[in-house]
Image (tube, helix red, strand yellow):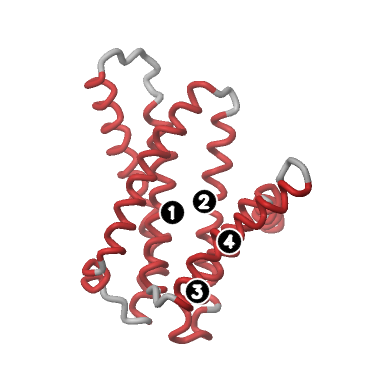
Amino acid sequence: PLPGAPADRRLKVAEIVARNSLAVVGVIFLGWSAQNLLVLYFFDTLGGLLALFASLVSIYPDRPRTTRLDRLYWLATALAVSAFLVAFFAIPLGVPVVIMAQMTSWSPREALADRTFVLALVAVLGLSLAGTVYWSQRLRQDPRGERALKREFALILGRWVVVIIAIMNFSIFFGRWAPLFLIVVYAVTSAYTELYPDRFERLFDRSGRRKS
């Protein structure tokens, strides 16, 4: 999963672990709100799905778009269609987050009063738009782009499914520390999907074969 020299791989592993541990460190030592972070992770998941859907929609119909206005119009159309599709995912994916918010008395008004939370939401939107442009270009230029996009979709969705499982089955045992527990689950799962994406996909494949 991590090609390169052993020293390069160790550096990459250290970078991935450090990046995904940042939120945990922030909650424990810097006073960050675990509830706010969990909500941001949810919107980040939706933003990732939006980028993938929008990139797929943006390449059809496959015709030249010569003017900037034409390209902007079709990008806006792709985002609107994708937002409609993401809304269907938001309901089942978001219900556990609503339950967690009620358990921990999370207040949307207080969260929106936090400037850093609002800036993070804006950053999620910006990353989603950047992801749309990236995947649109890759689908047009790389013959393997569609396969990579499907894999990215599976990883994003699978990562959040792990969080949902943790919410529904284990969070009740942690009481007021449940949001922090879920942040740790998300951080560990994110690092694992980056380090071992093939193994993560096979976990869900095995589940499917056992059910069939």
- The amino acid type found where label 1 is placed reads Thr
Give, as a three-letter code, the residue at label 3: Met
Residue sitting at x 43%, y 54% = 45
Q: Could you tell me if the residues under marks 3 and 1 are in contact, i.e. CB atoms within 8 Å?
A: no
Q: Is residue 199 left or right of residue 47?
A: right
> Which element type, helix, strand or loop, lies under badge 3?
helix
In the rendered structure, find residue 45 and report the number of the disc placed on it. 1
CB contact under 8 Å: marks 2 and 1: yes
Height in image: 36 above or below 3?
Answer: below
Residue 205: in sight, yes or no? no
Give the structural element (helix, strand or loop) at label 2. Answer: helix
Q: Amino acid at mark 2?
A: Ile
Q: Which mark is residue 112?
A: none
To which residue does mark 4 refer?
18
Of 38 and 9, the residue lying toward us: 9
Of labels 2 and 1, earlier in sequence is 1
For the point 53% across and 60% down, the residue is: 161
Q: CA distance from mark 3 to mark 2?
A: 19 Å
The Cα–Cα distance between marks 3 and 1, rounded to whole angstroms, is 18 Å
Q: Quadrant of residue 152?
A: top right
Disc number at residue 156?
Answer: 2
Marks 4 and 3, Cα distance to the nearest angstrom?
Answer: 27 Å
Examine the image and state in which quarter residue 93 appears. bottom left
Q: Earlier in the sequence, mark 4 or mark 3?
A: 4
Q: Which mark is residue 168?
A: 3
